[in-house]
Amino acid sequence: MTLQWEGEEQDRQAAIALAAQRAEFLSHAVGEPVLIANEFSEVRVQRVETRNGSRLMIESPKTGQWISLDPLELESLTWQSTATFSAMIGHPFGPLLPGEPK
């Protein structure tokens, strides 16, 4: 007997696609990654080149989560208040806005 869940195949396909995308980004990494950590968290930051220009790839080795941000997305972080970051930390792995997909 094999246990399965609804959406298992879609989850598997999405994971495969994201792993391929991550590998593609890392194949175009520039320089050495920078590790930033404290007692609560650890992230690895690395610049990657894409056909649309430079992006910053931010990874959490602990969770396996990652994101790549372009310069405008990075700049938008400077527009936020500490309350925005507190809200994100208060609801990890979930959407910031109600009804927003993850």
Image (tube, rainbow, N blue to C red):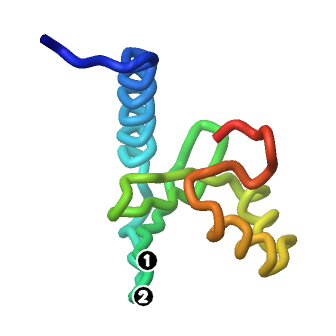
User: Residue 80, image x and y in percent?
Assistant: 83, 72
Badge 2 amino acid: Asn
Identify which residue is drawn at 36% across, 40% down: 23
Task: Specify few, some or many for label 2: CA neighbours under 10 Å numbering under 14, 14-19, or 20 or more.
Answer: few
Up the image or down, 99 lies above or below 45; here it is above
In the displayed image of the protein, which residue is found farthest to the left? 1
**Mark 1 vs 2: CB contact within 8 A:** yes
- Location of mark 2 (residue): 38
Residue sitting at x 68%, y 53%: 70
Q: Is residue 91 above or below residue 83?
A: above
Camera-side residue of 78 and 27: 78
Instruction: Name the spot of residue 85 as percent of width and height, x first.
Output: 72, 72
Q: What is the quadrant of the C terminus in the image? A: top right
Q: Is residue 83 left or right of residue 95?
A: right
Q: Identify which residue is drawn at 45% across, 26% down.
A: 14
State the residue position of label 1.
Answer: 41
Give me the C-alpha separation between circle 1 and circle 2: 6 Å
Q: Residue at x 40, y 66 (%)?
A: 31
- Image location of residue 50, percent across then percent down: 56, 42
